Amino acid sequence: MESKSAAARPAFPAELEYQSGFGNHFSSEAIAGALPRGQNSPLVCPYGLYAEQISGTSFTSPRKLNERSWLYRVKPSVTHEPFRPRVPTHGKLVSEFNESNSTATPTQLRWKPVEVPESPTDFIDGLYTVCGAGSSYLRHGFAIHMYTANKSMDDCAFCSADGDFLIVPQEGRLWITTECGRLQVSPGEIVVLPQGFRFVVDLPDGPSRGYVAEIFGTHFQLPDLGPIGANGLAASRDFLVPVAWFEHLPRPGYTIVQKFGGELFTAKQDFSPFNVVAWHGNYVPYKYDLSKFCPYNTVLVDHGDPSINTVLTAPTDRPGVALLDFVIFPPRWLVAEHTFRPPYYHRNCMSEFMGLIYGGYEAKADGFLPGGASLHSCMTPHGPDTKTFEATIALGNEAGPRRISNTMAFMFESCLMPRVCPWALESPYMDHNYYQCWIGLKSHFSYEPADEDGHDGI
């Protein structure tokens, strides 16, 4: 199903070169001397390049929060025809959630893995919104998408003017070409493509599917470590940023597809958007290998809150309250004594969307499959299924240390209450029997009354 133009693009090398760090000020040049020295926008740039800035924050944001990069390119990105609504329309992308396009429900929801379509479908057409809250127009909120694709993008590039994309591939590698360079992202890794950056997704392994969290009005950052100290969780040096790479070929009829307010618009141009010869700045795409995460856990009693497994957070103005956290449940040791070790039953003021990349999830012995998803909204009770509870109790207090292996589950957690899109509620992959995984929970109450009448005598 590979298109002729996609197949003509140069294959990624077996080992791509990257820069490492999180939030650093990076610089990279594909041709030595292409970066201007001493200033950002000289009268004439080296090699006759154009200087172009991309800003991820307002110009007057505090210095510690300001994100921007300077790109030095063969032609500026403004050289295109006017944007027009994409035909055919997409219809399943949402970035402003209200009663007209989505539904509020407190019911626990779960979806089985979605099959990859038989017809040729690229990343753009395979992307659909499951749920979300807020509005990209108001610069506050999030959308959770999923994607299934079986072909590389052909003669087009995609970008979102609405927010940052955090992509979690579950099946099939992604070769992602961005204006800053190229990234290979495998299942078990994530990639963040900031708002406004243009990119192409190629599928070297054929069919691919995965999850996407899109955040409006803010950017991801590393969580504070608090009492953990200076080390642990996701280390800055394990985040990888591309090095400059460019193509300088005529591309007549090349299409830029821009997501704007949840709608798709297209503009034609006669050159590749990946003509950036050099760049510098701290507003960049990046990837992270989840196997490098250093988890922390209890070493005596009780089960730690899932917040201890936060990889990235998108904060709000309220301290400690996240617009969206990206949390993982990786392989790790369980050693707590006299403790119910799986996640406890709870109701949460936050809303939790979960996915499974591979293996099984410790709190759901059955039904939660790789490529599937679940949603537990604000104050909706949830927790281990009946089978998991009974198996855990049966082990007693002498279970001993146990290593959870061959698993990688994750959670998108938000302080906002999500609304669910109609195609997600009506999906043939909806697990309508999800609630039954708890129905079998029985009472283990063992209190004995004090007298024959059944009263405790008080």
Image: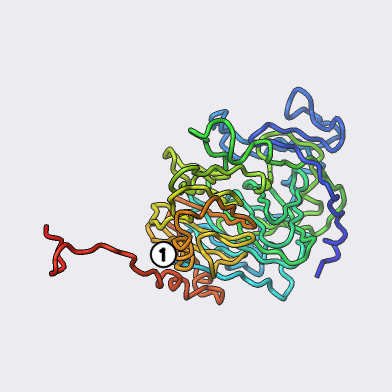
Q: Is residue 326 left or right of residue 349?
A: right
- Inspect this view and state whether residue 329 appears: yes
Q: Is residue 368 left or right of residue 235?
A: left
Residue of label 1? 104
- Quadrant in which the C terminus is drawn: bottom left
- Quadrant in which the N terminus is drawn: bottom right
Using the image as rendered, state which of residue 173 and residue 299 is in the foreground.
299
Q: Secondary structure at mark 1?
A: loop
Using the image as rendered, state which of residue 434 and residue 59 is in the foreground.
434
Q: Residue at x 82, y 39 (%)?
A: 277
- Amino acid type assigned to the residue bearing label 1 in the image: Ala
**Residue 353 at x, y percent in the picture:** 51, 58
Q: Residue at x 53, y 31 (%)?
A: 229
Using the image as rendered, state which of residue 45 and residue 189 is in the foreground.
189
**Residue 445 at x, y percent in the picture:** 30, 64
Q: Residue at x 87, y 51 (%)?
A: 249
Q: Is residue 267 left or right of residue 416?
A: right
**Residue 97 at x, y percent in the picture:** 47, 60
- Inspect this view and state whether residue 260 appears: no
Q: Residue at x 72, y 46 (%)?
A: 78
